[in-house]
Image: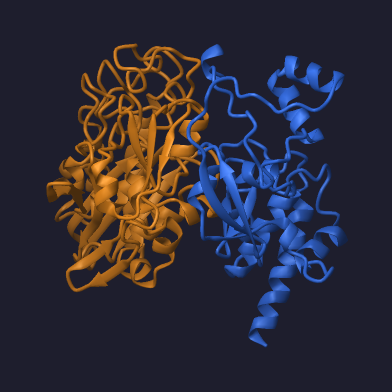
């Protein structure tokens, strides 16, 4: 087991958008706690906030400009940072969820240039110049995307953890022209897993919006 | 992930000069394109390169169909190739194999070249908690021989490795006589896909004929009478988003019910994508529905060896071939 979590923890903190902002956030504190960073946490809780010290020197940081929901962010990243981790840990866009981090569960689904991808399988530094849309960028002027509204209407979730990924994947699925039948949803939403088993209502919400979209397209 | 230096070269010549190497666990530098397999392997510490060289934006992503056949750019995504009208009409086995692979998200990210270079799904290879894996750590042994080997190969195995090759696309391409254009610093060379992947033998950690500093520059598939009437049948443990237990790519040239020419390849059973020329020869001249078809399919088992849990694949692959032939035959 030791071999699987070797010496260099990828959780070491790297400068975020505000390099002078060295305060630990609650999220980073919890992340460190989960990684077993007890000494650091004790110091933080006892006194003034301290900057996290990497366990060992990491690889050279790479400067990357990310375009997220129409806004550009210049970030210095450890090259190991996935797009998902950049969104959640550097840009504070925590709507996209980390389930498996291996491309199997779909909780991290975002759109890249309008196409659905798994953000846990992309290195953030390699999506420079691409337009990324997350669940935070789906509603416009306070108005929910029709699929977001359908999820609420149909109660298409239980714990809600997979929901942002289901919705982003569903939005793309419908845009691709799929999802109008139960079989179609099973086939074209296979990349999104719901541990609660809310598939029936998820499928119903997607079918409803897919059919409405198809009708609107036919005019 | 093990720490690595990330290179984002501006042109292909610079990328090739880094001398990265695909498909070898002892390589200190590797290329990354779509990343869907590489990032998983990095996350699991199965791959620990010191340097990762991005090919983003440096490789051709075009899909071209002409009188000579199909040319796939190495950076074309699985989704784009699967949806390409000319591929669907003229090379259906390729579109079907792609649509039966992975998930919609992964198909938007994963590339043609990366698909051919993906690493095996052998659970012992992918879990560093097991020390024995000759593919991951040369000389360490094989945990699958004598272990849980339901998913493993029955063709092309050795005493050092029985891991199955995971690509559906490669099985379809190999049935259609595809060739791989390889580009390196010295220039280009072309290799038939059937010679591109290597048998494990005593060096299962060397998976392809790619040398350091070489990349796939194109995939070429000749236009043939068989390609149009082709099909990919994938048998797996759930209906979607799963790797093959056994699969078959079949392409037929028919004269009424008579098989003039057949091309047959199988997946999920070989340590590399597996072409079955002896089955093809036996199928030529036979009639759809005749007893001769399953007899020809039975020749697929030549040289097959089960390892316990995967013994069933030897019977199953014959049935999968027969059903794929029936399905193609039923398509007018």
Residue at 35%, 17% in the rendered image: B137
Return the x and y of residue B32 as percentages of the image width and height: 39, 43
User: In the figure, the blue chain has which letter?
Assistant: A
Residue A67: x and y in percent read: 60, 59
Residue that lies at the very extreme toward the bottom in this rendered image:
A219
Does residue B158 appear anywhere in the picture? yes
Determine whether B10 is above or below A145 in the image. above
Residue drawn at the location 54% of the way across and 22% of the way down: A8
Residue nearest the viewer, comparing B241 with B254: B241
Query: In which image quadrant can residue A120 be found?
Result: top right
In the image shown, does B82 or A120 lie closer to the viewer? A120
Side of A31 where B105 appears, left or right: left
- Is A154 left or right of B263, judged from the image as shown? right
Indicate the colour of chain B. Answer: orange
Q: Is residue B107 above or below residue A208?
A: above
Q: Is residue A92 shown above or below A176?
A: above
Which residue sits at x=31%, y=47%? B170
Where residue B256 appears, as percent x and y from the top left, is 23, 68
Residue sitting at x 42%, y 46%: B234
């Amino acid at each position: 087991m030791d071999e699987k979590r070797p010496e260099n923890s990828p959780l070491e903190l790297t400068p975020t958008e505000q390099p002078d902002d060295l305060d630990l956030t609650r999220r980073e504190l919890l992340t460190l706690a989960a990684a077993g960073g007890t000494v650091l946490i004790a110091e933080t809780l006892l006194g003034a906030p301290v900057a996290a010290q990497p366990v060992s020197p990491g690889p050279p940081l790479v400067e990357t400009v990310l375009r997220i929901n129409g806004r550009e962010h210049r970030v210095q990243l450890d090259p190991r940072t996935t797009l998902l981790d950049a969104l959640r840990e550097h840009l504070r866009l925590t709507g996209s969820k980390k389930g498996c981090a291996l491309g199997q569960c779909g909780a991290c689904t975002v759109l890249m240039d309008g196409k659905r991808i798994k953000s846990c399988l992309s290195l953030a530094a390699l999506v420079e110049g691409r337009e990324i849309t997350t669940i935070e960028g789906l509603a416009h002027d306070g108005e929910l995307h029709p699929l977001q509204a359908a999820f609420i209407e149909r109660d298409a979730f239980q714990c809600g953890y997979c929901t942002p990924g289901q919705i982003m994947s569903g939005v793309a699925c419908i845009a691709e022209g799929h999802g109008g039948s139960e079989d179609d949803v099973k086939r074209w939403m296979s990349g999104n897993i719901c541990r609660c088993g809310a598939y029936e209502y998820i499928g119903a919400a997607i079918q409803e919006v897919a059919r409405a979209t198809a009708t609107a397209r036919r005019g | 992930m093990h720490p690595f230096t990330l290179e984002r070269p501006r042109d292909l010549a610079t990328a090739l000069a880094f001398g990265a190497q695909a498909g070898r666990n002892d390589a200190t530098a590797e290329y990354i394109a779509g990343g869907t397999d590489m990032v998983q392997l990095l996350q699991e510490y199965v791959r620990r390169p010191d340097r990762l060289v991005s090919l983003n934006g440096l490789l051709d992503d075009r899909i071209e169909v002409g009188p000579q056949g199909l040319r796939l750019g190495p950076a074309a995504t699985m989704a784009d190739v699967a949806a390409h009208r000319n591929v669907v009409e003229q090379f259906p086995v390729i579109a079907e194999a792609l649509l039966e692979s992975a998930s919609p998200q992964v198909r938007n990210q994963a590339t043609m070249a990366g698909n051919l270079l993906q690493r095996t799904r052998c659970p012992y290879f992918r879990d560093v908690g097991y020390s024995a894996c000759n593919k991951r750590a040369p000389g360490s042994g094989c945990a699958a021989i004598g272990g849980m080997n339901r998913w493993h190969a029955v063709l092309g195995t050795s005493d050092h490795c029985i891991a199955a090759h995971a690509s559906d696309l490669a099985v379809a391409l190999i049935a259609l006589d595809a060739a791989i254009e390889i580009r390196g610093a010295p220039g280009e060379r072309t290799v038939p896909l059937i010679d591109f992947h290597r048998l494990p033998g005593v060096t299962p950690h060397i998976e392809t004929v790619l040398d350091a500093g070489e990349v796939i520059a194109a995939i070429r598939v000749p236009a043939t009478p068989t390609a149009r009437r082709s099909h990919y049948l994938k048998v797996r443990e759930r209906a979607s988003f799963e790797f093959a237990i056994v699969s078959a790519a079949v392409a037929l040239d028919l004269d009424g019910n008579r098989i003039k020419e057949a091309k047959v390849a199988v997946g999920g059973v070989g340590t590399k994508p597996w072409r079955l020329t002896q089955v093809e020869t036996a199928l030529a001249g036979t009639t759809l529905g005749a007893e001769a078809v399953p007899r020809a399919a039975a020749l697929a088992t030549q040289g097959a060896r089960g390892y316990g849990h995967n013994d069933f694949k030897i019977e199953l692959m014959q049935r999968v071939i027969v059903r794929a032939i029936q399905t193609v035959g039923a398509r007018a």
